[in-house]
């Protein structure tokens, strides 16, 4: 997890575009993180990939923030 947060921090403060190797490492870390998520929380797709649906506990207060880029 340290690698992921370190790469995100490095990319966010840089005045230059991240290198191809930095982006590749970041994507690899993200894929690794998503692939180890608990199936109870994020059920897998029929293709055994990390799904987009997240199961939330009804007893825990939750705030949903929409993706502003997806709004019409």
Image: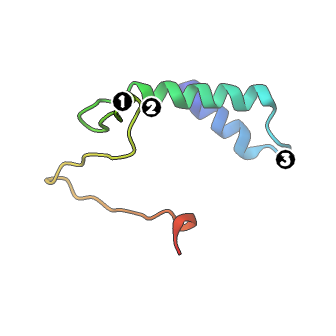
Q: Residue at x 71, y 32 (%)?
A: 23
Q: In the rendered image, which residue does mark 3 sit on?
A: 15
Instruction: Check disc 3: other Cα within 10 Å, few if <14, some if 14-19, many if 20+.
Output: few
Instruction: Check disc 2: other Cα within 10 Å, few if <14, some if 14-19, many if 20+.
Output: some
Residue 1 seen anywhere in this rendered image of the structure: no
In space, the residues marked 2 and 1 are separated at their CA atoms by 5 Å
Which one is in front in this view, the residue at disc 3 or the one at disc 2? 2
In space, the residues marked 3 and 2 are separated at their CA atoms by 28 Å
In space, the residues marked 1 and 3 are separated at their CA atoms by 33 Å
- Colour scheme in use: rainbow
* Of the image marks 3 and 2, the number of the one nearer the N terminus: 3
Q: Residue at x 29, y 36 (%)?
A: 43
x, y percentage for residue 3?
Answer: 59, 25
Q: Is residue 25 left or right of residue 45?
A: right
Q: Residue at x 23, y 34 (%)?
A: 40
Q: Nearer the viewer, residue 61 or 51?
A: 51
Q: Is residue 40 left or right of residue 37?
A: left
Marks 2 & 1, CB-CB < 8 Å contact: yes
Q: In the rendered image, which residue does mark 2 sit on?
A: 34
x, y percentage for residue 14?
Answer: 80, 43
Q: In the rendered image, which residue does mark 1 sit on?
A: 37
* Of the image marks 1 and 3, the number of the one nearer the N terminus: 3
């Amino acid at each position: 997890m340290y690698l992921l947060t370190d790469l995100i921090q490095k990319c966010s403060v840089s005045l230059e575009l991240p290198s191809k190797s930095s982006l590749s490492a970041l994507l690899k870390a993200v894929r690794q993180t998503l692939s180890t998520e608990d199936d109870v929380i994020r059920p897998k797709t029929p293709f055994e990939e990390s799904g987009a649906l997240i199961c939330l506990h009804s007893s825990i207060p939750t705030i949903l923030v929409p993706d502003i880029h997806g709004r019409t």
